[in-house]
Amino acid sequence: MSANVKDFVIKKVQELIQAPSCCAEAKEAGQNWLDAVGTDREAEAFKNLATELEEDIMPIDGLIAFAGSEAGAQVFGGEKAKEVLAHAQEIKASGAKYCDCAACAACEAILEKKGELL
C-alpha cells in the first residue's frame, strides 16, 4: 500500500465521520481505524471498518425505494422525499450505483481502495 492511498483513505474516513448522514457505528469504526493507523491494530481495524461500510452504504435502488415510500416521506418530509426520489432516479440514470450523500460517497471511495489496504 502506498502512502498516497493511505492518505487518501484517511481523508475520506475523516469526511465520513464528519458527514451528517453517517451513522454512529460507521463513525465509531472510522475513528477506531484512524486511531489504529500506524499501529499493529491497523489492518484489523480497517477490516472492521470495511465490513461496517459494506453494511451501511445505500445502493441506489434502496434509496429510490425508501424515498418513494411512506417511511421515506416521514423521515425526509413529503416534499423533500420527492426531491430525494427525483435526484436518486436522475443519478441512477447517469450510472450511479449508490446514494451520493456525503456519507455514502465517502464509503464508496474508501471501499474502492479496500483491496489496497487489506
Image: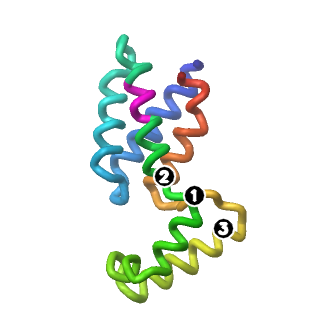
Question: What residue is drawn where x is 58% and y is 66%?
Answer: 61
69 or 75, which lies in front? 69
Question: What residue is drawn where x is 53% and y is 65%?
Answer: 62
Question: For residue 109, what is the image quadrant?
Answer: top right
In the image, residue 54 sits, relative to residue 36, either above or below, namely: below
Asked whether the residues under the numbered discs 3 and 1 touch, taking CB atoms below 8 Å apart as contact, a structural biologist would say no
**Magenta region: which residues?**
45-49
What residue sits right under mark 2 in the picture? 57
Q: Number of numbered discs present?
A: 3
Q: Is residue 112 left or right of residue 50?
A: right
Residue 48 highlighted magenta (yes or no): yes
Q: How is the image coloured?
A: rainbow
Residue 16 highlighted magenta (yes or no): no
Q: On the rendered image, what quadrant is the C terminus found in?
A: top right
Question: Residue 112: x and y, percent?
Answer: 60, 38
What residue sits right under mark 3 in the picture? 92
Q: CA distance from mark 3 to mark 1?
A: 8 Å
Q: CA distance from mark 2 to mark 1?
A: 7 Å
Question: Residue 83: x and y, percent?
Answer: 50, 82
What residue sits right under mark 1 in the picture? 98
